[in-house]
Image (cartoon, rainbow, N blue to C red):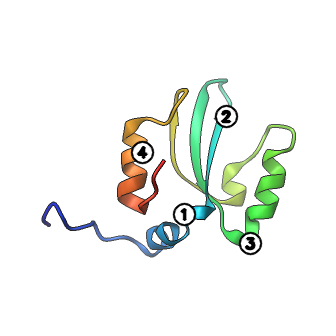
Amino acid sequence: MSTTEKPKRSFFEKEVARSGHLIHKLKAKDATGRWAYYFVYVPAAKERLFLRAIEGDGTVDLEKYGKVIASCYGEEPTQEVKDFLKEKYDFKV
C-alpha cells in the first residue's frame, strides 16, 4: 500500500466516518478517579437517551448507548488519539 492510499475500512468504520456528527467527546473521571477523554459513537436512535444520561447523576455506562471508539487519560486528548481518529474515521478533534 502506498503512503497516499487510505487503509481499508470495515462497514462500521465507514458508517462512523459518514456520521461524524454522532461522535461525542466526553471528559470525565473514570472509575478510579482519573481524568479521561472518551470518544463515543452514538447511533442517532439512541442519541436522545444518551444526552439525558450524561446530564444525570454522573454515572453512565457508555457502551449501553454507543461504542467507545477511542479514549485516553489526561487533561486533553493525546496526539496519538487525534491521529487515530483522523486516520480511521476522518474525524478531526
Residue neighbourhood size for the residue with mark 1, other residues' Cα within 10 Å, grouped as few (<14), some (14–19), many (≥20):
some
Q: Residue at x 14, y 67 (%)?
A: 1
Q: Secondary structure at mark 3?
A: helix
Q: Residues within 10 Å of mark 2 (few under 14, many from 20)?
A: some
Q: Which residue is mark 4?
A: 82
> Dot 1 corresponds to which residue?
20
Tag 3 near tag 2, CB within 8 Å: no
Q: Is residue 31 above or below residue 21?
A: above
What amino acid is at disc 3? Ala
User: Relative to 61, is 17 on the left or the right?
Assistant: left
Q: Which residue is mark 2?
A: 28
Q: Amino acid at mark 4?
A: Lys
**How far apart are the two marked residues, 1 and 4, measured between alpha carbons?**
14 Å
In primary-sequence order, the first of circles 4 and 2 is 2
Q: Position of residue 92 (x, y in %)?
A: 45, 52
Comes first in the chain, label 3 or label 2: 2
**Percent coordinates x, y for residue 74 in the rendering:** 53, 27
